[in-house]
Amino acid sequence: MENGILKGKKGIIFGALNELSIAWKTALAVHREGAQIVLTNTPVALRFGSVGELAKLCDAALIPADATSVADLEALVDAALEHFGGKFDFVLHSVGMSPNIRKRIPYEDLNYDYFDKTLDISAISFHKLLSVLYKKDALNQGGSVVALTYLAGDRCVSGYSDMSDAKALLQSICRTFGDIYGRHNGVRVNTISQSPTLTSAGQGIEGMESMYEYASRMSPLGNADAQDCADYIVTLFSDYTRKVTMQNLYHDGGFSSMACCPEDLKLKV
Ligand code: NAI
């Protein structure tokens, strides 16, 4: 699949860590469709990860930024404006991490310093990013910003712990900033609620493999994988979705509309 629907567009992609990352697949997909990109991740992830290889494959600039640091985000946006020779068209926020989940601390006993970090990295960073982009007037008219979320932001999914709260906040920031951006210069802001996906972040969740299997059985189309997600993001960065904004868009093979799994109930479908 290659349609050149992003020809002439430019943007920043956060969160490519390794070949499994949703952002990694997205970088390759937007490059395939003709876009120019800047890749970013934390200085540590860039130093020790394989993102340099991805940058070569996509002919992309690589600029470090901790997404929780306003100073880093300002420097990143300035560098991107210089690199592209002016404003750009899209940004992907594919960033998330919970120290509480990493350390297997149960929800009823959260460490509150870690909870602050979860919210800062996984949600407030999105506000910081949108705010820096706005103040620097960095996005072209009709641009598009996408962040990744999960169903646990609107329904209870056992084991997703404080990431559920972070995702709920992320989705709310999307709506509130979407209103401001839409009126300002027609920039769209959306979240994609993605199927369980076997990435580094995904595999950190306890019970992820059984949730993955369960979701796959429940979803009429099966789970959406990272490549499917990348292709969906391409459409959201394109001009074909210019009136879609402030939405939480389910990209989950139909999972979120199902009440039970026909296979488990032994129903013939
Ligand atoms: P991943 O582990 O490949 O990506 C997470 C990225 O966040 C990494 O590149 C990491 O370096 C980056 N990151 C962490 N702290 C950061 C910081 N302070 N500043 C900048 N970057 C930072 O995993 P994946 O699955 O590709 O995750 C991407 C997004 O998709 C996350 O928001 C995740 O919550 C979301 N998502 C993942 C699902 C899954 O099952 N894997 C399902 C639904 C949503």
Image (spheres, rainbow, N blue to C red):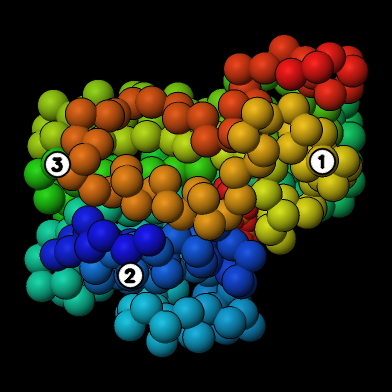
Dot 1 amino acid type: Glu
Q: Which one is closest to the eye, mark 3 or mark 1?
A: 1
- Sequence-wise, which precedes: disc 3 or disc 1? 3
Between 225 and 1, the one lying in front of the other is: 1
Instruction: State the residue at coordinates (74%, 37%).
Output: 216
What secondary structure is found at the residue carrying circle 2?
A: helix
Question: From the image, which quarter does the N terminus lie in?
Answer: bottom left
The residue identified by callout 3 is 142
Q: Which mark is residue 213?
A: 1
Residue 262 in which image quadrant: top right
Tag 2: Cα neighbours inside 10 Å, few (<14), some, or many (≥20)?
Answer: many
SS class, disc 3: strand
Residues tagged 2 and 3 counted as in contact (Cβ below 8 A): no
As shown in the figure, which amino acid type bears the numbered disc 2?
His
Q: Amino acid at mark 3?
A: Gly
Q: Residue at x 32, y 43 (%)?
A: 236
Q: Which residue is mark 2?
A: 31
In the image, what residue occupies the spot 16% across and 72% down?
Answer: 84
Task: Name the residue at 25% across, 24% down.
Answer: 179
Which of the 4 image quarters holds residue 224?
Answer: top right
